[in-house]
Amino acid sequence: LAKLEDEQNPPLPIGQAWTAFRASPSRPDSSVETLYQYECQFSAFAEWRKTTHPGIATLRDVTKEIAEEYATSLNGGRLSPSTYNKHLNLLTLVFRVLKHKAKLTSNPWEDIKRKRVVAHSRRELTLDELKKVCQSATGELQTLIAVGVYSGLRLGDCATLRWGEVDLPRGQIRRIPNKTA
């Protein structure tokens, strides 16, 4: 009976999964950039599957063992814990969104342990450290650092500052920082 139903309404092939995910009203709203990143991550899995498990044709055929094998291939020292987790989270999301269309009984990605991400904090420079940096800089770097010190702009914003954003008579800089733009 299940075989007859599969013939009439086949499970979702991996090659059609990304298109189905993009079209699904169940997927979260994401920016164009985020969707592009997701597509790259899903494509990496799809290409890996073609070379390592060419007989696996549908999402339903992806077992927990295959998911673990892919996760192991990701963590071969090439990816940071954060990137590794993002790959697994995206695959978990795709399989969850396409659960009914792909006729999944379980999500093989859910139980794979994510890597611990160690946050690297930043601190302000002390006055002595700031003096050393300013005194040792030369040429254009010294100018960029001075603009940053006196304006509070980040180095990237200092480097891309335009004369049209500087009002010398009023002593003002009108700039929307790149990080918040």
Image (spheres, rainbow, N blue to C red):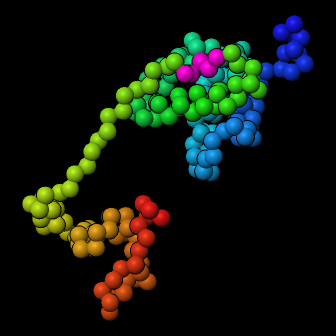
Q: Is 172 drawn above or below residue 66 in the view shown? A: below
**Can you give x and y, in whole percent of width and height, for residue 47 in the image?**
64, 28
**Can you give x and y, in whole percent of width and height, for residue 133 in the image?**
16, 62
Total count of labels? 0
Report the residue that reaches farthest toward the top: 1
Q: Is residue 168 left or right of residue 72?
A: left
Report the residue that reaches farthest toward the left: 128
Residue in view at x 48 percent, y 64 percent: 181
**Can you give x and y, in whole percent of width and height, for residue 69 in the image?**
53, 16
Q: Is residue 3 left or right of residue 110?
A: right
The answer to which quarter of the image holds residue 82 is top left
The quadrant in which the N terminus is found is top right
Q: Is 14 drawn above or below residue 135 in the view shown? A: above
Between 177 and 160, the residue placed more toward the observer is: 177
Question: Can residue 109 be found in the magenta stretch?
Answer: yes
Between 4 and 48, the residue placed more toward the observer is: 4
Residue in view at x 29 percent, y 41 percent: 120
Q: Is residue 79 left or right of residue 123?
A: right
Q: Point out the stretch of residues depicted in magenta.
A: 106-110
